[in-house]
Image (tube, helix red, strand yellow):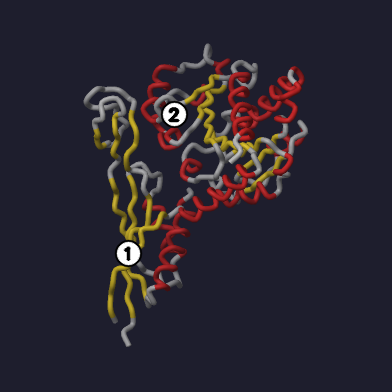
Amino acid sequence: MHELAVTESILSIALKHARQANASRVTDIYIVLGQLSTIVDDSVQFYWDMISEGTLCSDAELHFQRTPAKLLCLDCATEYTLDTDLTACPNCHNAHVKVVSGEEFFLDSIAIEKDTE
Amino acid sequence: MSSMRVPIIEKILDANDQVAAMNQQLLTSKKVYSINLMASPGAGKTSLILETIRVLREFSSKDACFLSLLRIGVIEGDTAPVTIDADKVLAVGMPAVQINTGGNCHLDAIMVRQGMEKLPLDQLDLVIVENVGNLVCPAAFKLGTHANVLIASIPEGDDKPYKYPNIYRNLDVLIVNKIDLLPYIPFDMDYFRQGVEILNPGLLTFPVSAKTGEGIHAWVSWLTQRVRDLKKNDR
C-alpha cells in the first residue's frame, strides 16, 4: 500500500536528474530492488502509469533488477544466499546471522533522449 | 535526437531518511528520548502506552527522582480521521497529537515532524510515536526515533516473525503482550523465539500483559534508563 509514496519518490528523483541533463524525454528507469525489500513492483508500475502522465517520464519503462539476499553467519562466518524461506546457517545450523545485502532500494539510472540542435 | 544513459544511484526513500535524521537530531538536542511503537491492529499499542504511563507514575510516587521523567508526549498515527487513541492519552493528562495519514498505511518522517511541532518538546522527556497498526509498511519508513519497538501479541499467533520478517529485522526491542492469554491459546513460544532469533539475534524482549500489569515494570525500567542515558549524554 505504501507503493504510491515510493512511486512519487521515484518520479521526483527521475525528473530532477532528467531536467539536469536537459532531457526531452525519459525512456527507461532502472531500479535496483533487494529481495528483502517489501516493495511490490507491480504496484509501483500501476501507480507509475498514473502519476508519470504528462511529465518528462510519461511512457518511460520501469526495469527492476532484483538483488539476492545475502546473510552472514556470526558464529562460523559462512556467507550464504537466501532462497525464499528464512534459513539458518547451512554450515553450523545456528540462527545467529546478519543481513549483508538484500535490503537495497535505489534508482540506479535513467535513459533519456535529447533534442540535438 | 540523441539517447543516453544518466547514472543516478540515489536511495528512493532518501528524502524520508533525511527528514528522519533531522527528527532525531532535534529530539536528541532537546534530550527527548523517542520510540516508534509498531504492531498489528489490536495488539495493544495504546493499552501499553497507558499502562506505561500508569507505572511511571507509580515509580515517581515512590521515588522523587522519577518526577522529572514523567513528561511524555504521544504522537498517534491512524489511517482514519478519528481521535480515539489520542483522546485516551489526553484523558490521563499527557499531551497527545493525532495524525491522520489520509488512508496511508504507515507514518513517515514528515508526518512525525508535523506531530513533533505540535508537542511541547521543551517540556518533555519522552515521545512515543504510535504507528499505524500494520506489520508491513511501517518497517520501510524511518521516523527518526531513537528506538524501534514492536508489540507482538499472543492471539496473533506464533508464526508472525516468519510471515512479517522485515519488521522484526530492524527492531531494538520486542514486547510480547497479552501473556495472560497463554493458557487459552495455542502459542509455541520456542517456535516464535526461533523465528525472532534468526531475524534479529539477541533481540531484547519483554513478555508483558498490559491488562494484568505483569512484566510492565521491567519494560518501564528499561525505558526510563534510556531516557536517563540521553539526559546524561552531554553531546
Tell me whether marks 2 and 1 sit on the same chain. Answer: yes
- Circle 2 or circle 1, nearest the eye: 1
Q: Residue B100 versus residue A115: which sits nearer the camera?
A: A115
As displayed, is residue A103 above or below residue A25?
Answer: above
Instruction: Tell me the kind of residue under disc 2.
Output: Lys
Q: Chain of mark 1?
A: B
Farthest left residue in view:
A91
Query: Quarter of the image containing the N terminus of chain B?
Result: bottom left
* Crowd around label 1: few <14 · some 14–19 · many ≥20 (10 Å): few
Q: CA–CA distance between discs 2 and 1?
A: 39 Å
The chain carrying label 2 is B
Write the residue at 28% across / 72% down. B4
- Which numbered disc flags the more N-terminal residue, 2 or 1? 1
Secondary structure under tag 1 reads: strand
From the image, tell me which residue sits under label 2.
Answer: B160
Q: Give the vertical position of B177 relative to A54 (above or below).
A: above
Q: Position of residue A40 (x, y in %)?
A: 39, 49
Q: Residue furthest top?
A: B183
The disc labelled 1 sits on which kind of residue? Pro
- The answer to which of B215 and B190 lies nearer the viewer is B215
Q: Residue at x 34, y 50 (%)?
A: A33
The disc placed on residue B7 is 1
Query: Pointers 2 and 1 in contact (CB under 8 A)?
Result: no
Q: Residues within 10 Å of mark 2 (few under 14, many from 20)?
A: some
Q: Position of residue A27 (x, y in %)?
A: 33, 69
